[in-house]
Amino acid sequence: SFTVTHDIKCTMIDGKVCNVLTDQKSSASCNICGAKPNQMNDLNLVMSLKENKENYKFVLKQNKKKKIQRELKLHLSISVDFVRQGYGTTNDGNTARRFFEEPEKVAKILQIDANLIRKFGTILQILSCGLEIDLDKFEKYAIETAKLFIQHYSWYNMPPTIHKVLIHGRKI
């Protein structure tokens, strides 16, 4: 017999995910006290509602995401992860190209290792160049990048997409 447990690490979440995690039916309702829009102006009522202090962590993550988005817009003139009506999000090739052009600025904004950003940028260029690549060299570079990721961020599980590229990219 064995037990499976899940450990969710919410790093950057949007409002919809926050609502799911906090059992909110509406994004207009407060994730902390549950106040509905038509109750928010009734200060006596909302001050009496019980706060779910566990939910503060989700709100803080959203604020961090917004801060990062503002910093990227200010310093790199890119809009990352904003919804565009009828087009998906602002995450496209031009945004990625601009993002990886200045790894030091990005590293400072995201508070992560600049060399790791540089390596991810190189891997993205290799995978999207359309030319034949030396698979042995690519695999070696990808594994070095995976090791660098783990060296700096062993406390954070490697996202599946990054894992697929770094570990299985040679075969893709």
Image (cartoon, rainbow, N blue to C red):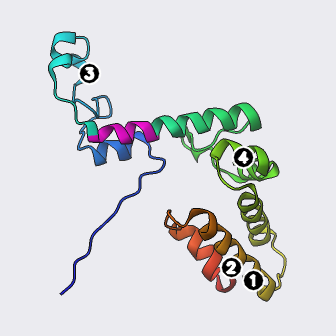
Residue 102 lies, in percent from the top left, at 80, 48
In the rendered structure, which amino acid carries the disc numbered 2? Answer: Ile
- Percent x, y of residue 106: 72, 46
Q: Quadrant of the N terminus?
A: bottom left
Q: Which residues are magenta?
A: 54-61
Mark 4 element type? helix
Q: Which mark is residue 140?
A: 1
Q: How many marks?
A: 4
Which comes sooner in the sequence, label 2 or label 3?
A: 3
**Considering only order in the chain, which callout, 1 or 3, is on the residue closer to the N terminus?**
3
Residue 158 lies, with reference to residue 92, above or below; the image says below
* SS at mark 1 in the image: helix
Check the image and report above or below for 116 versus 150. Answer: above
Residue kind at label 4, given as amino acid type = Val
74 magenta-colored: no
Per the rendering, the mark at residue 37 is: 3
Q: Which mark is residue 57?
A: none
Query: Which amino acid lies under the numbered mark 1 shown in the image of this protein?
Result: Lys
Q: Earlier in the sequence, mark 3 or mark 4?
A: 3
Category of crowding for the residue at label 1, using alpha-carbon neighbours closer than 10 angstroms: few (below 14), some (14–19), many (at least 20): some
Q: Is residue 51 left or right of residue 70?
A: left
Question: Residue 106 has which mark?
Answer: 4
